[in-house]
Image: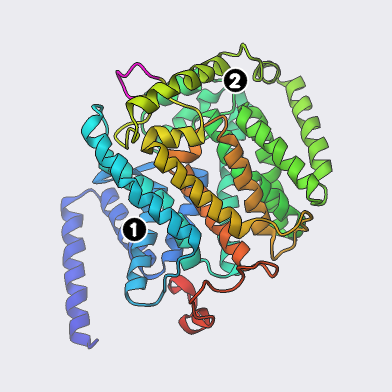
Amino acid sequence: MTTRPLAILALLCGLLFGGLLVFVPPATFLLALIAVVVGLLVLRTPFYGLAGFALSATFMPLATVRLGIRITVCEALLAAAWAGTVWQLFTQQLQWHWGRTEKALALLMVFSVIPFLVGQVTIHAEGNGPVNWIRWLLNLSTLWLVPLLLPDLRRRELLVNLLLLGNLAMLVVSLGMFARHRNALDMIPLLKHLHYAHPEAMQDIFGGMRNRLGTPWVHPNLSGGALILFAPLAMILALVRRGWGRVLALAVAVLAAVAIVLTGSRGALLSMAVVLLWMAWTGIPTSRRLIVGGLALSVAMALFYPPLQKRLSTMFDASNASTEVRMDEYRHFPQAMARYPLGIGFKTDPPVPGSGLLGISNLWLNYIYKIGLPGMLLFCVVLGRWWRETRPQGRTQRPTPANAIWLGSLAGLGGALLTGVFDHYYSFTMVLVALFWLMLGLNLQGARQRPDSTTAGPPPGADPDLTARLGPPGGLP
């Protein structure tokens, strides 16, 4: 480009931003300028958008920003990452290769059009169905960003470090604030400062469960479910890393274990126990010590924090109020299936206001509630194809620097799916869904590149020298 066009472009930019500075407050102008710079950077290098998503989604998952519509900060970064990725696909700096799991997920997303349209017509409730549907599709799409932007172990290690850093920041803030007064309500001023939506709902949740740990995930069960996705990954990485990487992983593993106990989430506690037993059965070093240490930690915390002792003693009691509610949900669920054979769509979450029905605290049944039985079966097809590609080859699994992310994410995903027996959060809860599919993508990519994997190497039909010819993905230098 010659000097004259550059001068004209500079003049136009000066006039534009000068005009904005005249008509808008300085603070708004500064935010707009930063947003433009970040947007251009992510458009050029979409990996940075995914990195920002990983950090913000684990640290302040429900912090919002208004961009025409109200959306979480991390989802805005995810959308920006996709904008950059689409541009690089258009300019052929990236190429798309779908595996069987990605194709099955695409089929699930296409099918969701039917319950979305049915729900728009038949469900009479407040809510923006189109926006909720598009946000859900955006959250699912993190599975596809992994092979596009994270094709090598170095890039995946970097993203995992950001996920762990975000979790560490969230845990330090949550545990630090809870330790002062042992009251979850202390978290509310911070979340309001981050522009969390529905402050009245936060007040009800934290006020009704003030003795349980408050986190940026708001609900204690949701907090436990989110932590179970990352705690096993941190444990296994702590075994194979050295230096600051080991300190980071170990800090997340220890603090996550403490936080899971303090949330009092039955699903998270049982899932963590099953994951530790699986790690011991597969021969992962120190896993038996982790089981003993976890039991000792739980007992010690209960002794010094009586509300936790009460919670642990009653959470598995059949007369527990929460258990009774869940039993009522199961008893009424057949009525919901009969009334909504194709699900209720995306305008609202179960139960539909005024229907006289209850919701459902189960991952798979919530799929039926939202997008019908065919939708749940398609979800199972996706999981089945993922499992065939990523399942361990043999019983004994020894963690190494090369397979630690695959093994840790496999344990975390298993724990997340186990929580689905008690809670529905990994089905349609925004942001947490995106983290689930991002972890599944990391696990899938690690499995495909295992030395012992039958699917190792590039996907069928791919050019094995593609990465070498195209250079680093996402425009990274």
The overriding secondary structure of the stretch rendered in magenta is loop
Give the amino acid at mark 1.
Ile
Determine which of the numbered discs, if any, sits on residue 211 in the image.
2
Determine which of the numbered discs, if any, sits on residue 317 in the image.
none
Q: Residue at x 22, y 74 (%)?
A: 10
Vertical placement of residue 279 versus 348, above or below: below
Q: Residue at x 49, y 51 (%)?
A: 382
First in sequence: mark 2 or mark 1?
Answer: 1
Q: Residue at x 46, y 26 (%)?
A: 360
Residue 31, percent from left and from top: 31, 52
Residue 69, percent from left and from top: 26, 43
Q: Nearer the viewer, residue 358 or 258?
A: 358
Q: Reply yes or no: does residue 315 show up in magenta.
A: no
Mark 1 Cα shell of 10 Å, populated few (<14), some (14-19), many (≥20): few
Q: Is residue 22 left or right of residue 319?
A: left
Q: Is residue 215 left or right of residue 252?
A: left
| Region of the chain picked out in magenta, as a range | 352-357
Vertical placement of residue 455 versus 477, above or below: above
Q: Quadrant of the N terminus?
A: bottom left
Mark 2 Cα shell of 10 Å, populated few (<14), some (14-19), many (≥20): many
Is residue 266 among the parts visible in the rendering?
A: yes
Q: Nearer the viewer, mark 2 or mark 1?
A: 2
Q: Secondary structure at mark 1?
A: helix
Residue designated by label 1: 34
Q: Nearer the viewer, residue 280 or 243?
A: 280
Q: Which residue is most to the top?
A: 319
Residue 184, percent from left and from top: 54, 25
Q: Nearer the viewer, residue 299 or 126?
A: 126
Q: Is residue 118 left or right of residue 328?
A: left
Give the amino acid at mark 2.
Asn
Is residue 199 among the parts visible in the rendering?
A: no
